[in-house]
Amino acid sequence: MTPRREPLVLGSRTDAGPDRFEFHTVDGVDAPDAFCPGELLALEHLWERDLGRLRTVDARYGVLGIVLAERATSVRMTASSARAAALCERNAAENGVDATVELATGLASVDGPPAHSFDTVAFVPEPYTPIEIGVRRICSALASLASDGALFLAAKPETGLGRYEDALDDAASTVETVAERDGWTLLRATGSRTADGGRPDPPFDRFEATVDGIDLTLVTAPGLFAAGGLDHGTRLLAETAAVADGDRVLDLCCGYGPLAAYAGCVADCSVWASDDDALATACAERTLAANGVDGRVVTADCVAGVADRTFDAVLCNPPTHAGSGVLAELFRGAADVLAPDGRCWVVHHRALDLSDPLAAFGRVETVATGEEHVVRLARR
């Protein structure tokens, strides 16, 4: 993963370690150009505490876990994004911090209970985290606390502060405001009052869709792309792409796996699906199982999880919102894993120009046009 900008720098308050911390960031990870004010607020309050076993949820690129490691006996950073998890590992190593990085959804109902309890959990929800998922992570975090442990949550009204306060009032034994600055509030909560130990039912939902005569059962979760129903672009791509018996097929940026499921239903092919988001791949695994498709699902940044393989067909509805750096890296990787005579099918909105990132391929042509989307066929 190539850095896209200069590292962010924080001064150190300890004589025992480095005089400053450097954090590499990249496109596609929250707050890449400046430190999150909520994390800085949490840092200043927690620095004076003995943190014991520390866990950070939604770790971004590792600021809380790395800086607070001096105050903790152990550090575990949880990230639901493979890209973010890789950044956490890199930043911990380059700052000389011993920390465990866990690629997981942060939901006990999906990941299972943690191996041990924590004395301190810090959680600064990302601004685009669906409130339902954020609340479920709160319940899971509370359940992971030791008997005298505490959860610290930083938010502002625009990122769901009111809803998170309500959730803590319902789920925790005690809740108090411990710091405020520039619209951000840091809450401290202790104890878990949930009857099931903080493991609510998994957040999965499902719906039925018919694509070119093929009936599919699709398993989704809040916050995933097109969670409420199959989007027109994915449908157009599925109806356009040609998948044959014996093909090695990759659903790249698979989301909850509709393209992988469709490919496995229309042809006797080898199916792989990959996505950066752990909740998306948890859904994709369930989508393949619901449709009787025997496939492999991996959680990885771009093509990192399949870089040692080659594919005859790559199907991709890319995260165009993630930025040009992510798209360029994604399509370079797709070209690398494509067999010499393979085909890569990409769908995107007609208004977007993806000529630059698609230049990783030797030949690109438009093969289908819908009301809002186009399908491009790329070859090496």
Image: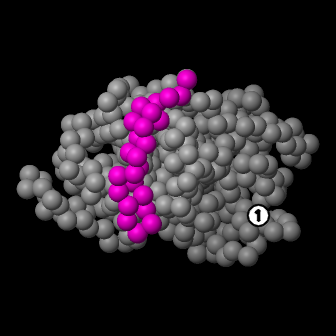
Left or right of 138? Residue 343 is right
- Compared with 308, 239 (above or below) is below
Report whether residue 347 is seen: yes
Q: Single out the residue that lies furthest toward the right.
A: 213
- Compared with 112, 75 (above or below) is below
Left or right of 350? Residue 314 is left
Instruction: State the image coordinates of residue 253 (x, y, percent, origin top left).
Output: 61, 52
Please state, as top left, top right, bottom left or bottom right, where the C terminus lies in the image. Answer: bottom right
Q: Mark 1 — residue?
A: 375
Q: Viewer-proximal residue, 307 or 46? A: 46
Instruction: State the image coordinates of residue 222 (x, y, percent, origin top left).
Output: 66, 46
Left or right of 175? Residue 327 is right
Please state, as top left, top right, bottom left or bottom right, where the N terminus lies in the image. Answer: bottom left
Q: Which residues are magenta?
A: 172-195
Tell me the residue at 26%/67% (across/down).
Answer: 9
Tell me the residue at 8%/52% (across/down).
Answer: 16
Q: Viewer-proximal residue, 349 or 116? A: 116
Tell me the residue at 89%/47% (across/down).
Answer: 212
Report whether residue 300 is seen: no
- Compared with 141, 32 (above or below) is below
Q: Amino acid at mark 1?
A: Val
